[in-house]
Structures are given as structure tokens and as C-alpha cells.
Image (cartoon, rainbow, N blue to C red):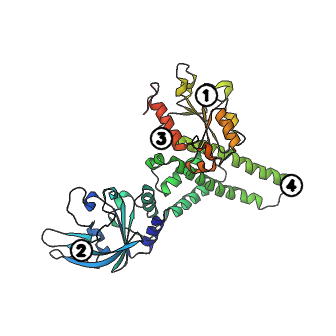
Amino acid sequence: MSEILDYTIENVKKSKAAFCRFITANDTGKNGSHQAGFYIPKCAAKLLFETPGVKGQNKDKTVKVKWQNDFTTDSRFIYYGEKTRNEYRITRFGKGFPFFEDNNVGDLLIITKETEDYYNGMILQTDEDIDSFMAYFNLSSEMTNQLISIDNVQSPDKRFDASFAEFINKYTDFPETTVMAQFARECYNQSYQISRNGICKDPDLYMLKWIESEYELFRRLEEKIYSAIYKNAFNNCQALIDFANSILNRRKSRAGKSLEHHLATVFTIANLKYEEQVVTEDNKRPDFIFPNGEAYHNLLFPAEKLVFLGAKTTCKDRWRQVLNEANRIDTKFLFTLQQGISKNQLKEMKHEHLILVVPQAYKKFFDKEYQDEIYTLSSFINFVHETQQTNPYITIP
């Protein structure tokens, strides 16, 4: 989380009252309106005054508002009740107030009350910060423009843990990897309110979040299932070794399969046409062929419009395995979670027309000379999109 997001969440949690709403063009005056300051709806009146305004009378008070934990304004809270007006506003921000620009439209405004005459004002400007704030307080976009209820707030982390506990209680043995992967994704997305649009914008980030979530789910389930065994003494060393090996083998098998499941989900959300485990030459089964096996085996389909992607959690010693898995495709892609390999191996990969695909956060672990040639998951998706959109043989939904 960003520093301003952390600060905002803590301020809301300890405040006497808290309010949030999206900044509109009316607030900034960019749509030609002559409104003054931030409008506060009547349902949030107690944020500003101890008692609501009386129709037919104006009332106001001057307060200090500290913005972004940085600078303070002597602002005015006012209720307009005279004549036809019946509204609350926050006004007087001083010259050069930085949040009345056109690019502030759509930012999330949060006001918190510390005392009757001292408040905090925060502006969240990035999608990630806004989504995280809404998720923390379990808010939807329809639940803004009103006071924030902080009673019995369950943080995303607590919702995440509660969902995991409920899942683990259902099982006495390991479910299929597809079930584990799907639940981990859905649990993470629901707990932190991650949308399909958010995943499309940053597939590299959420791919890693899903993998991390599934690992944590597997670790907890593993502890439950195996604890009854390892708490008892083993009859001999071989029994202990066999038990340990069974754990390690299950871990390695699950990791590889879950990577493929999560990649497939990303590709589906991105509206790519693909097929998994297509049978190619010598009964080989590549992890992903774009658009599908039918196109691969149709010799009239242009080979340059076919895309191959292998998936391996680590590839230091295994990257050569994918080189002969699809003979029609000269240049192959390999997605990996490997965090860096030697310069000599990168050179050899380039010679063999193999392009690495890694999460954006992992590119820094590779030799600088080759970083520009390594794809991120996002850039790979864009590459496949471009290939399929310019392909007369493919109809994109």
C-alpha cells in the first residue's frame, strides 16, 4: 500500500466521523458551474455540525483541515438554508489549492473528524489506492457520498483469512489443483475487490497475487492434513523419508499445474483465443497454443500467426524441453517465475529463438543487456492480441 493510503485508512479508523465521495467536475468548476467548494450531502451533516441546519437560516464555522498529512487550510463549513437553498459545503481552501484541477475529477475525497474544529482531508488519486481503500472498508461505488461506517469493519485480510478457514474445514484430503487455484483466485479477488478490468490493466501483479494466495492456502491445508501423521513417531528412517518425499512431490506437482491454471484464467479474461495441451508432433503437448490446435494442424493457417507459450515455474535447467514441442512455430515463448538466470543461458536462449516471459517485477533480476528482450505477461498478452486482431482466420469475440 502507498503511504497516503496507509495514512488515510488509519485516520478513518480512529476518527469520530468519516466521509468519502468522488470529486466531480462541479467541485472543480471545470464544467462551467459556479459551485463553491465540496458539496456534502445531508446524510453526512453530522460530519460538519453537531446539530443539523435549520431551513431558512444559514450557519457556518471555521475549522482547520490538514490535507495529505502535509499542509493545513483554514476552511469554512457552511449550511445554506436561506431562500431556496438547502445544502452543506466545505469552502475556503486558499489560493493554489492543488485538488481543483481537471485531472482531480474522479479522485476519491476522504474527510475525517478529529475534534470539532480539526479535520483531516485526503485525496486518493490512483486506481490501486482507491480500490484498496474501498476494499478495506467494504465499500462499493454506490456507498460513497455518505458517512463511512467503521463499526465491525472487517479488513480484506480478515475476510481473506476467514474464507481460507472455511475452505480448509471442508476438506480432509487435497482437492484437485483446478479447485485450489480457482478458490485462491476468487478468494483474493473478492476479499480485495479486484475487478476483471483491474486484472486486464495489471495481469503481472495479480498473477503473482494469485500464486501467493494459492501457496498460502495449500500450506494451511497441508498442515491440517499432515499434522496428524508427523506428530506420531515413524517406525524407521525410510518411512520418514518416504513421507517427506511424498510432501515434496505433491508441492512440485501442484506448483506447475497451478501456474498453468492461473495463466489460462488471465488469457480468458484478456479475451485471447488459446488451447491448452494441444497434441503436436511426436505426441508432444505444449502448455498453450494460440489460437488453437485446429489452426496449428491446418497447414493453410499461416505459421507466423501461431503463438507458442510454455510454462515452467523454474527454467534454469528445463527451458530446452520446450524447443521441439511445436515444430511449425520457430520462435517460442516461455513463461517462468525464475528470478534470473546466467547471461550465457540467456544468450543460448536467444540463439534458439526462445523468448522469456516473466512477471514485470522479476525483470530486474535478469542481466541488463537482455532485459529489453524479455516480455512481461502484459506485453505478451498485447503481442498475442495484435497477432489475433490482424489475423483473417480468427474472429475475436
Task: Return the disc, 4 or 2, that comes first in the chain's sequence.
Answer: 2
- Considering every residue shown, the one lying at the far top of the view is 300
Task: Return the disc, 1 or 3, that comes first in the chain's sequence.
Answer: 3
The answer to which of 208 and 358 lies nearer the viewer is: 358
SS class, disc 2: strand
SS class, disc 4: helix
Left or right, residue 67 beside residue 75: right
Nearer mark to the viewer, of 4 and 3: 3
Residue 188 drawn at (x, y percent):
52, 54
Left or right, residue 142 beside residue 262: left
Nearer mark to the viewer, of 4 and 1: 1
Q: Is residue 143 above or below residue 249?
A: below
Residue 354 drawn at (x, y percent):
63, 35
Q: CA distance from mark 4 to mark 3?
A: 50 Å
Q: CA distance from mark 3 to mark 2?
A: 48 Å
Find out whether the residues at labels 4 and 1 contact each other: C-beta distance under 8 Å: no
Residue 372 drawn at (x, y percent):
57, 42
Nearer mark to the viewer, of 1 and 3: 1
Q: CA distance from mark 4 to mark 1?
A: 49 Å
Find out whether the residues at labels 2 and 1 contact each other: C-beta distance under 8 Å: no
Local crowd size for mark 3, using a 10 Å CA cut-off: few (<14), some (14–19), many (≥20): some
Q: Residue at x 39, y 58 (%)?
A: 140
Task: Return the disc, 4 or 1, that comes first in the chain's sequence.
Answer: 4
Under mark 3, the amino acid is: Ala
The answer to which of 378 and 353 lies nearer the viewer is: 353
Q: Which mark is residue 330?
A: 1
Task: Return the disc, 2 or 1, that comes first in the chain's sequence.
Answer: 2
Residue that carries the numbered disc 3 in the rendered image: 270
Under mark 1, the amino acid is: Asp
Residue that carries the numbered disc 4 in the rendered image: 237
